[in-house]
Image (cartoon, grey):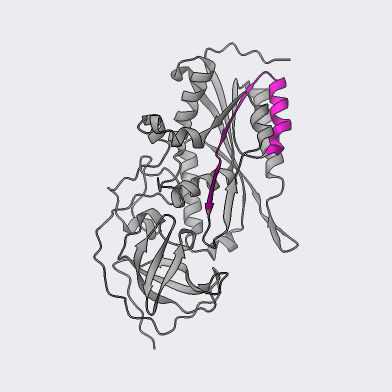
Amino acid sequence: MALLNTSKLTRIGVFYDGNYFLHVSNYYAFNHLRNSRISLRGLHDFIRAQVGIKEGEETRLCQIVDSHFFRGRISANEAQTRGNLLYYDRVFEDILMWEGVITHYLPIRNTGGRREEKGIDVWMALEAYELTLLKQFDVVVLITSDGDYVPLVRKLNNLGARVMVLSWDFEFDDNEGKHVVTRTSQELLEEVTYPISMHEIIENRAMRNDPIIQNLFVKRDEAAPRQALFNTDSAYTPVKSDIRDPRDVAIDREPHAIKEPRVQREVRTETETIGGETSGERFDGYVLSLKNGYGFIKYPPNNLFFHASDLLNADFPELQEGDPVEFGIGYNREGDEVAKTVKLMLDDDTVEDDE
């Protein structure tokens, strides 16, 4: 039986497959020419506009009344060993809070030596169905690529709700040369009422300067101090206009001159080997060149490759050639040395003297 909604508003419920959304956001931040993350606020405005077009309603009468974010999460102890990951997670949760998105987390478990995110898709499907039943959404928006949600879509259709799926198809080579392909389930696209191919809209040259498309990506505010990103004890408290997406607290981009390589630290051991390093030694150098999602560090006798995902305490698009960095050394599949666990060195960082 179809739901009866006498409201003049078109009521929208949005449900995020969290890992998929972050995968898409990382792609645009590190492997796309835009070099910027997806803005939640901009995405919600885009959703309202698209629903208005599809439903034949004014955008102001299309309102997101509920939005939910589902994701598996590693333990705090594990996150603490990964640089500033706990801080970045908190920043992202602040963004979700500002945009009125309710978070749902399940622990990521180790099964047979593999980390698995079990049950989160079932939870998302149950919540989407139950909330549509109780709150009478006119349009349910799913941000996912997984064909496992086809039964959910059919159930929502039975309730009389129209289902929109935002999908991205893209491919790129990761830091180990592996070709990564992301495709949305064709069965899912055929089952929903409104399939929206986001990659086609974003790459459409005719819409390049459309504000609704431009606002899909985070715009960096250069008014906040650079130190704030790296110092969790900083007195700087991000305000609503500053916080828009993970690792996107504003940074003041000071020009850096190309510097000579800094002196190597003799030995500074760490209690744990992370990021594929072969030892606990740390070294100093500077950023020689930056490409799309990766770069090279000047370190005699060779220049060391590093990937954006190995940068611990900064956002890759904020790096500049000449920035001083500290890093460990690991090896890629071919046995070549690469830089791992790279940290941007701030102006007030000092080298500790060995006793």
Image height of 82 relative to 179, above or below: below
Q: Position of residue 123 (x, y in %)?
A: 69, 39
Q: Is residue 285 left or right of residue 337?
A: left
Identify the residue at the far right of this view. 112
- Viewer-closest of 141 and 93: 141
Q: Is residue 328 left or right of residue 115?
A: left
Residue at 37% across / 56% down in the picture?
229
Q: Is residue 235 left or right of residue 176?
A: left
Which quadrant of the structure image shows residue 79? bottom right
Q: Is residue 308 visible?
A: yes
- Viewer-closest of 88 and 331: 331
Image height of 172 relative to 207, above or below: below
- Viewer-closest of 38 and 197: 197
On-image quarter of the C terminus: bottom left
157 in magenta? yes
What is the span of residues highlighted in magenta in the rendered image?
147-172
Residue at 55% across / 30% down in the picture?
196
Residue at 55% across / 39% down in the picture?
168
Q: Position of residue 313 (x, y in %)?
A: 42, 61
Q: Is residue 127 visible?
A: no
On-image quarter of the N terminus: top right
71 in magenta? no
Which quadrant of the structure image shows residue 66? top right
Q: Position of residue 133 (x, y in %)?
A: 68, 23
Residue at 71% across / 40% down in the picture?
122
